[in-house]
Image: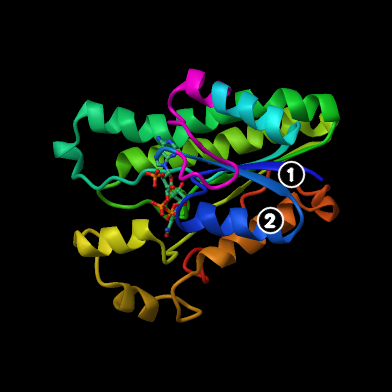
Amino acid sequence: MKTAVVTGGGSGIGAAVAQRLRTDGYQVATLDLKPPTGDDHTYGADVTDPVAVDKALNAIRQQLGPVTVLVNAAGLDGFKRFTNLTFAAWQRVIDVNLNGVFHCIQAALPDMLNARWGRIVNISSSSAHSGQPFMAHYVAAKSAVNGVTKALALELGLSGITVNAVPPGFIDTPMLRAAEERGVLGGTIQQHIERTPVRRVGRAEDIAAACAFLISDEAGYITGQILGVNGGRNT
Ligand code: NAP
């Protein structure tokens, strides 16, 4: 049985990906900021802390065996007019969304290289395609995640490892609800639905389905791709 690590697996999209992979027969460990709940295979680590990430990955390896699937779903949004954006806020958003991806891939990659098989899926954002006002730091980080995805796909193809990104757009999760509550979404969820071609909000399971496909053996010829799941909001 293959072992998968899903960062941000305690909430929203990460939780749906973890659930879907369990259903598909993977052993799944989740990595979150919050300390473990006592559930099986949940680990607490801040993805910005390479020592904590390494420690968690080693514990997962010991418990579940080599990690050959990694889904980077941990993320932090941020809304600030650029003129009010502090460097500290800029850095934190880059740290979680981009540097966190670096640390987690670095920690998991040796197992994939040993196995000569691996799957990495990075959850970026449709805002990297469309841009988004008041989110310069977030858009910068997510655009860089798409870039890392493409570069690593070229580097790791020969080792049997695929690297793809899924940029979600407008998915009903605690992150989206919190943005609506804070009034930073540029309208209500209902107003956004009316501007979405498929006329509904996305579900975390929509993202999980795309990840499950990219992770499957039959997706072995798909790498370096940015697979938008956004109800047609970006084409
Ligand atoms: P969410 O419900 O807020 O989940 C985010 C998860 O990331 C949480 O489990 C959180 O853990 C974890 N996390 C945050 N900072 C972390 C850190 N430093 N170290 C470890 N874990 C950390 O949000 P979501 O909507 O499911 O977002 C999942 C991913 O999709 C994110 O990368 C987000 O940027 C991206 N995305 C979402 C949408 C959307 O419409 N929802 C659109 C575009 C992109 P705690 O709960 O322990 O804090």
Q: Residue at x 77, y 55 (%)?
A: 25
Q: Residues within 10 Å of mark 2 (few under 14, many from 20)?
A: some
Q: Secondary structure at mark 2?
A: helix
Q: Residue at x 50, y 69 (%)?
A: 203
Q: Nearer the viewer, residue 64 or 134?
A: 64
The residue segment tinted magenta is 36-54
Q: Is 17 drawn above or below residue 37 in the view shown?
A: below
Q: Is mark 2 within 8 Å of ligand 1?
A: no
Residue at which label 2 appears: 22
Residue projecting furthest to the top = 51
Cα separation, mark 1 vs mark 2, equals 23 Å
Under mark 2, the amino acid is Arg
Under mark 1, the amino acid is Thr
Q: Is 100 drawn above or below residue 179 in the view shown?
A: above
Residue 38 part of the magenta-drawn span: yes
Residue 4 figure quarter: top right
Q: Residue at x 35, y 56 (%)?
A: 175
Residue 220 position, x and y percent, is 83, 47
Q: Is 197 drawn above or below residue 88 in the view shown?
A: below
Residue projecting furthest to the left = 84
- What color scheme is it? rainbow
* Position of the N terminus by quadrant: top right
Residue 114 position, x and y percent, is 82, 24
Residue at which label 1 appears: 223
Marked residue nearer the N-terminal end (1 or 2): 2
129 sits to left or right of 1: left
